[in-house]
Amino acid sequence: MGILPFVAELGLIDHHCHGVLRTDSTREEFESLLLEADAVSPLGGSFFDSALGFAVRRWCAPLLDLPRHASAEAYLERRNSLHITEVSRTFLMASGIHTFLVDGGFQPDRLLSAPELASLAGAEAREIVRLEHLAEELSTAATTNEFLYQLRLRLRSPSVVGAKSVAAYRMGLAISGERPTEDEALRAMYVWQTWNPGPLKDPVVISWLAWEAMDAGLPLQFHVGYGDSDIDLHRCDPSLLTPFLRATSGLGVPVMLLHNYPFHRQAGYLAQVFPHVFCDLGLATHGLGHQASRVLGEALEIVPYGKFLFSSDAFGLPELYYLGALLFRRALSDFLADGLRRDAFLEEDAHRIARLIASENASRVYKL
Amino acid sequence: MGILPFVAELGLIDHHCHGVLRTDSTREEFESLLLEADAVSPLGGSFFDSALGFAVRRWCAPLLDLPRHASAEAYLERRNSLHITEVSRTFLMASGIHTFLVDGGFQPDRLLSAPELASLAGAEAREIVRLEHLAEELSTAATTNEFLYQLRLRLRSPSVVGAKSVAAYRMGLAISGERPTEDEALRAMYVWQTWNPGPLKDPVVISWLAWEAMDAGLPLQFHVGYGDSDIDLHRCDPSLLTPFLRATSGLGVPVMLLHNYPFHRQAGYLAQVFPHVFCDLGLATHGLGHQASRVLGEALEIVPYGKFLFSSDAFGLPELYYLGALLFRRALSDFLADGLRRDAFLEEDAHRIARLIASENASRVYKL
Amino acid sequence: MGILPFVAELGLIDHHCHGVLRTDSTREEFESLLLEADAVSPLGGSFFDSALGFAVRRWCAPLLDLPRHASAEAYLERRNSLHITEVSRTFLMASGIHTFLVDGGFQPDRLLSAPELASLAGAEAREIVRLEHLAEELSTAATTNEFLYQLRLRLRSPSVVGAKSVAAYRMGLAISGERPTEDEALRAMYVWQTWNPGPLKDPVVISWLAWEAMDAGLPLQFHVGYGDSDIDLHRCDPSLLTPFLRATSGLGVPVMLLHNYPFHRQAGYLAQVFPHVFCDLGLATHGLGHQASRVLGEALEIVPYGKFLFSSDAFGLPELYYLGALLFRRALSDFLADGLRRDAFLEEDAHRIARLIASENASRVYKL
């Protein structure tokens, strides 16, 4: 149950992550960033008693010169005795991720930007523009024309390699297969801003933004499945996207299904049948801790191996990039070792599958 | 694949079960109580040819002094040669369950009551009040005030430690996040009793009862997922409860998601993100027989270990308490042994996880 | 991880498959028939880089006198150097399937008919009539009476042993529990043919056809779950069939849930609680390649063993019959070997379970 050497040495492209926190964390903040809950509850006990909590103690403690399985208290004490920049650099460097595609549109003030992250990690970073956040920012534009101009300019910025929709959080994934006209979108924008200012939830605007991103040729990421308590999980089943995927399948622009747990089999189905659909298991890979192998195996059941990517979906805590990469490597290694043991493919095939998933699919799709 | 010694010796709190039958069973009755079907069909063959049927032959036969894997015929012959009280005592005592939380609201005439169960098992028993059944019983009250008084009195009875909603069977789990007013509830009650007497299916009344139980501070259990042919399984996905969970998350009153199979991953998600949500794998644990380990592993993927409980959901046949406990121990042991083998946590951590799930979470939540 | 001898020798009834192609295949055609995609996309790479692609190279190459794991190029070159009849015969004979139940209603011009398939394989073949296809064919009948007469005659043809509904593709599985009257059905037919000619999508006609098939006593197959990009996967959850299953449970006519992935647990639940419901894992079994064992284990969690059947759902490529049978045998063997290792049942029980699933359930249900 170690890691196959060729998997341990893979350079990774993390095609979906966020920035790391600029500051130290209290225990309360650390625990709440560990899982997707808003806060720890005395009813349910410490989040260190979870698969991910144990993974922090097992795998992260040694990188801070503590013994494996150091207690939560010892871990946080040691962590806070160091400068957060040093802690972050340690975990980022140890992840083996050489390129980060960063969605910087959620809580940007708390987090390092993409260039800061790249610099700290000694790696490359490129930007993923978060569509709803961008529309919210630009919605104060003086005129409609100015809004459209700025939006389209930003989608074509050289630093941007992809777009992301959080429709899952705002309306669910039942996006229409019919493209709204520009007029319909602008009318819906007006209604949103006039009558219901605040987070963008209008389905017409959200769907129109997705098409605009595809016009710009940007691979379009969708949050799918597992997230925090703001989602209604049953509305985040990726098969709800089918009409949209059918409508966009001829454009030659990739659609990336993120996370997907517990709908990773549905995502694999979509990635198999639609030429432009890809998927990953971000967030779940580290969230599952020592059980990640079974679920990665499930995620790889029917998806062609040219259609699956690595991502961490790490947010805030540098430990999550490291664990995202490490537990992904362990799970991928288990998958390949099992295939080799069953004589399902040759060792050279296993190497090729590993390279595809670790970085080559991302390079091809995002044209890195 | 044995049981780790510290798991074998765990005292269990069964936070959701029913009573045992007062009488012997014919083969037909035994088979129909084994699974969730109404009856055995000649089209499909004997239910002894199922995971649970084989578990009865493997594990229960020796407790009746038969060889392992005794035939179904030999098993039932031996069982019926003994007094049912003796049979029941044997299996209840062997389960290692020291406290039963009993939902006595389904077919109470056929079953031992909570105190009778306790006495037979040499254990403790406390009551879970079944909300829809209670409302049906009290609906003959002379006046609305009398109904309200009796309802609230019963919810505050010292013997009652929790409430249970079978909304899943009556309306599905898409309960509104808005609390009905008392007036709305009483109007809906009137319509139900006047125009549509019979089982309570009105969504306003069912939802209002859930809030009344939470007012009384009672942990509120929901049937979720797997049950008999009266449910529409897709309407029993626990994520349909999200609006209700969001609305009640600040009350500090626990919500317990029961069974959950095949939505146990969705249940684990909800238990992670909502501070007051807990879950179990009752019914499925024994229903899966020798395959329980994989599914318990799945159920424990992302749920914090302070949020998961043991239950049998046993009904009628005393074998089901024993198998519920035994197969749970085996599956929990497999989960912990796998974690230890992978060095995911220390042995002392494994002990703590085991105690939390076996009884400590239940003690804390139900204030036992 | 070999195959238990008694599983290797099982004669199989394939209760759901299609015909094999009459002609050789180009690489493009071969790859597109391998998976459920319409075509291979340069965005995502070759479908040989998939679980099924590797299974072809591993298991099919030796039957064409190539080494295991021969490259895709070598495999296709060798395959095309042989006559397609010889290739087809080789794989069909090697499958160990002695009876094929053939749905010949999809792309009949490209494929061998049931009798041709039987002759080539040295096996038996019987017909499954595809209801929507039949209605489309007969819809040019001169009169309503002629339509009804021909429909009912065909459903009672001696060569027909079952019917199949592709409601999943045309309307989803949310079929009403109320039987349409003949008048309602004929009115809906008229509207379909007059205003919307083309594939039958009318829910009243589709549902009425299902009832007509049951009137004829034909086991009624439903496509469920996994298929090509024409389905909306979330509308193919078998639990959407619950009202229809409840309404038909007293008829004594079997309902067969086909494929089911990724809803195989839901299918197992339905097969457990409804006396007339049966299920399989066709298409997924070979689609999953070396990972088929885990999913077959899941599919067999709560279904009584008298309710589960083998099928390949092979279409077009003769390799798929062989792989469907071979990977099914491997997965079934893994399931039984695991049960024996855990002492869950006796070897004679394992033999009986194997025979039930391999052929006896199909013999009983289809009265073969």
Image: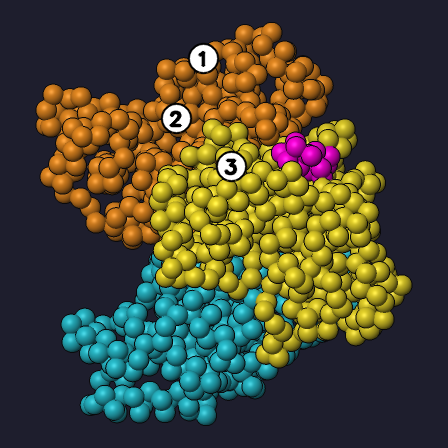
Chain colours: A cyan, B orange, C yellow
Q: Amino acid at mark 3?
A: Met
Residue B358 x %, y %: 49, 36
Viewer-side residue, B360 vs B252: B252
Picture residue at 71% right of the left edge, 57% below the top = C112
Disc 3 versus disc 1: nearer the observer: 3
User: On the image, numbered disc 2 is attached to which residue?
Assistant: B102
**In the rendered image, which residue does mark 3 sit on?**
C214
Q: Are the residues at dot 1 and dot 2 in contact (C-beta closer than 8 Å)?
A: no
Residue A231 x/y as whole percent:
36, 60
Residue, disc 1:
B22
Q: Quadrant of the C terminus of chain B?
A: top left
Determine crowd level at label 3: few under 14, some 14-19, many 20+ residues with C-alpha closer than 10 A: many
Along the line of sight, the residue nearer the viewer: B260 or A144: A144
Q: Nearer the viewer, mark 1 or mark 2?
A: 1
- Quarter of the image holding residue C337? top right
Element on which disc 2 rests: strand
- Quick one: SS at disc 1? loop
